[in-house]
Amino acid sequence: MIGAEVCLLLVFPSVLFLIITGVPVAWMVSSDGKEETIYLFLTVFHSRNPVVPRYILSDRDEAQLSAIRRVYKSSHLFLCLWHVLHAWRAHLRTSQYPDVWAALQQLPRADSKDAFDRIWNTIKRQAPADFVSYLQKYWMSGK
C-alpha cells in the first residue's frame, strides 16, 4: 500500500478531479453527483492504482464524503477551507453582519477547543437565528 501525501478531490457539478501531490491523475465526468456514481469511480480508480492517500481534501458534499469514506477508510478526510467559507457566506448577508463574518473566518483556524468555543459563542450571540440553526444542522452535528 503506497501512501500519498495529499489527495485533492475537486468536484464541480458534474466533474471530479483526483490530484495526488500536485499531479492530476484521474477525472470523472458524470451527469449526476450521486454517492454510488462517485463510489464506482473511486473503486475503479483504486483497483487500478495502489495509492492510498494519507489526507483527502474535499468540499461538504455528502455523496462525495460517503463515497470517499467507503473506498479510502484509512485516509484522513478534511474539508477545504475555501469551500467551507464559500458555503457559509452563501447563507449569511455578510454586509449586514461583518463581525459575524470575521468570526466565521476565524472559527476553522481556532487552535484550541477554548478558542473554538469562544468564537462559536460569539457567532451564536451575534448571528441571525436561522443562520445559527443552519450551522448547527449542517456543520456542528458531528456527522
Image (cartoon, rainbow, N blue to C red):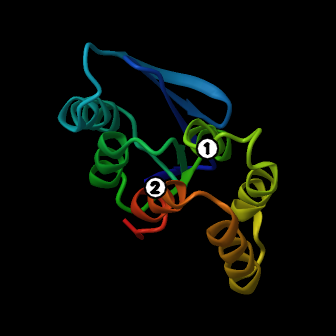
Q: Is disc 2 placed on a helix, strand or loop? A: helix
In the foreground, 2 or 70: 70
Q: Looking at the picture, how far across and down is residue 137, in whole percent?
A: 39, 61
* Horizontal arrangement in the rendering, residue 15 relative to residue 111 (left or right): left
The residue shown at (29%, 41%) is 63
Above or below for 105 versus 48? below
Residue under pointer 2: 134
Q: Looking at the picture, how far across and down is residue 119, in whole percent?
A: 73, 72
The residue shown at (33%, 54%) is 69
Residue under pointer 1: 92
Q: Quadrant of residue 113?
A: bottom right
* Horizontal arrangement in the rendering, residue 107 relative to residue 56 (left or right): right
Check the image and name the residue furthest to the left. Answer: 36
* Horizontal arrangement in the rendering, residue 121 relative to residue 27 (left or right): right
Q: Amino acid at mark 2?
A: Tyr
The residue shown at (46%, 65%) is 136
Q: CA distance from mark 1 to mark 2?
A: 10 Å
* Horizontal arrangement in the rendering, residue 127 relative to residue 50 (left or right): right
